[in-house]
Image (cartoon, helix red, strand yellow):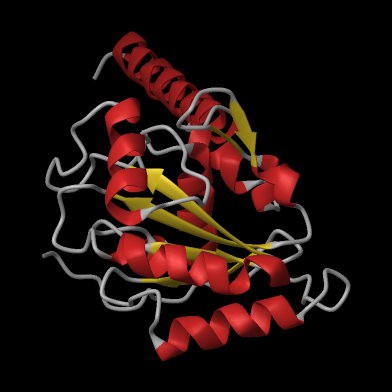
Amino acid sequence: MPEHTSTAGTKRRTWLASALALAMVWAMTNGLPATADSAKALAYDFNFEAIEGGRMPLAQWRGKVLLVVNTASFCGFTPQYEGLQALWQRYEAKGLVVVGVPSNDFGGQEPKSEGEILGFCKGAYNVSFPLTSKQVVSGPQAHPFYRWAADALGAGAAPKWNFHKYLVGRDGRLISAFGTRVTPQAPELIRAVEAALAQTPAQTPAQTPAKTPAKTQAKN
């Protein structure tokens, strides 16, 4: 083989190796938004928009226990609104905040406008706990809170259907996730809420939560 041909091949391989190395460096330093979200330590770092309009920073509930639930108006599990309202009324004075997050992600079961959703929730279930505007809660386009939560607890704990529940402690760290079929009155959820309420921010463990599988999810 002529010497100049061998030299050209070597240069080409060197160039390709350099290009690959640069691409890897770019990927490491310019990741998806979820990477930046996962670096955030607390739920208080995230903001929603209220269903009535205006910002809804989770930091306004610093020191309280949050139960963040993705909701839908035309789902077989929609009656859980009644249980969520009862849970909110039972534990609000002790520091629980239920946050409803309407989403059309699963089965297209939240297709209406924010105004119609709010009217339905108040009219059908007398909902008084905070509701956000409609949000994407699954996949790469999910709201930053949901991308952060999925990274913190693992993909198995991410929402698979409507009325999935994330429990956040008084220190702003995720505690656990509960699947769709775990109702607001389920003993395991009540125990987790009461245990979280019994803690103070100083008492709550500071470590990052271990990634654990979610409770059983199910479609209606």
- 61 shown above or below 155: above
Q: Residue at x 13, y 62 (%)?
A: 76
Q: Quadrant of the N terminus?
A: top left
Task: Left or right? Give the position of 71 relative to 78.
Answer: right
Q: Position of residue 178 (x, y in %)?
A: 40, 72
- 185 shown above or below 97: below
The tally of labels here is 0
Q: Residue at x 55, y 27 (%)?
A: 30
Q: Farthest right residue?
A: 202
Q: Residue at x 53, y 65 (%)?
A: 88
Task: Left or right? Give the position of 219 relative to 120.
Answer: left
Q: Residue at x 37, y 45 (%)?
A: 122
Q: Does residue 138 show up? A: no
Q: Position of residue 158 (x, y in %)?
A: 37, 59
Query: Which is more toward the observer, 17 or 6?
Result: 17
Q: Quadrant of the C terminus?
A: bottom left
Q: Position of residue 6 (x, y in %)?
A: 33, 19
